[in-house]
Image: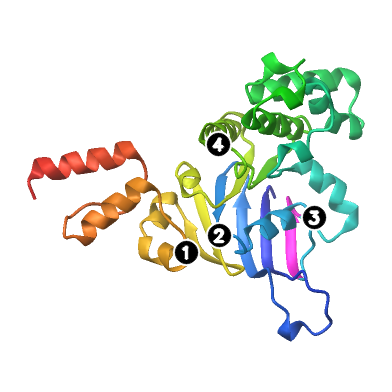
Amino acid sequence: MSNIVFENVSYTYTEQPNLSNIPFAVKNINLTIEKGSSVVILGHNGSGKSTLAKLINGILLPTSGKVTVNGMDTSNQENILEIRRTVGMVFQNPDNQIVATVVEEDVAFGPENLGVPPHEIRSRVEYALNAVGMSEFRLHAPHQLSGGQKQRIAIAGVIAMKPQYIILDESTAMLDPYGRREILDTAHSLNKNENITTVLITHYMEEAVYADRVIVMNDGSVVMDGSPAYVFSNVDKLKAIGLDVPQPTELLYLLSKDGHKLPAGIMTVKDAADALEKYLLKGE
């Protein structure tokens, strides 16, 4: 079965035999992430979202419960290599994932370590660089690239290993708005055009707008799970756990609180403008 499944998963970073008093980074998580979907996991620092990401490909193993990737249990060491081929991870700092002095050599590094034949490596590198829009930089030195370009090269290095899933763990956190937009566009393209399941871990609300599904975490637990429109229609609940909402959502929320009959869950500037125009033309 092609999906990622969490069954009653808890994890603690504390090594103590008495589990009754241990703080858990994640607790009693039950989730299924379907193949081909685009998922965003939101939460403030310490909410457990990055721990969840590391549990997916066996960087961390559950303290209790079970995580399976396409039916493979992450706790079984015999599965780890295949799981890490299936699930690619892109981390916050691209400099930690770039290992070569030339872009195309860096992208080739992963397949080489998997024992992929040289002719296949060449085609994979070309495919991966095209997928992230970086083919013209193949002979550049990575250190000369912008932050967003470096992160796209890190993603290309993961793509070259042909994963079915890519987990982007706070991969936009160190980037400026333009760099963040580059990575979001790349993730969206990989999901829609290459059918790669993407899981984006972030605390930027705007990055969740175009996902298929948004999972909100707080204090190690899943507190909301649904479409972006559903999640962002619960403004009070999000604010209660210290999260903001996209600015268009906030604007219509405040106007609604002031007595204006406007729809909830509006997330983009265009949709907010359309809703306001419709409202004003009705003269309510």
User: Label 1 vs label 2: CA separation?
Assistant: 7 Å
**N-terminal label among 1 and 4:** 4
Where is mark 1, residue-wise? 242
Q: Is residue 64 or residue 180 the one in the foreground? A: 180
Is residue 266 visible in the rendered structure shown here?
A: no
Asked whether the residues under the numbered discs 1 and 2 touch, taking CB atoms below 8 Å apart as contact, a structural biologist would say: yes
Asked if residue 276 is positioned above or below residue 254 in the image, the reply reads above
**N-terminal label among 2 and 3:** 2
Where is mark 3, residue-wise? 58
Where is mark 4, residue-wise? 176
Q: Amino acid at mark 2?
A: His
Q: Amino acid at mark 4?
A: Asp
Disc number for residue 139: none
- Residue shown at 54%/52% (left/top)? 203
Q: Which residues are magenta?
A: 64-71
Asked whether the residues under the numbered discs 2 and 4 touch, taking CB atoms below 8 Å apart as contact, a structural biologist would say: no
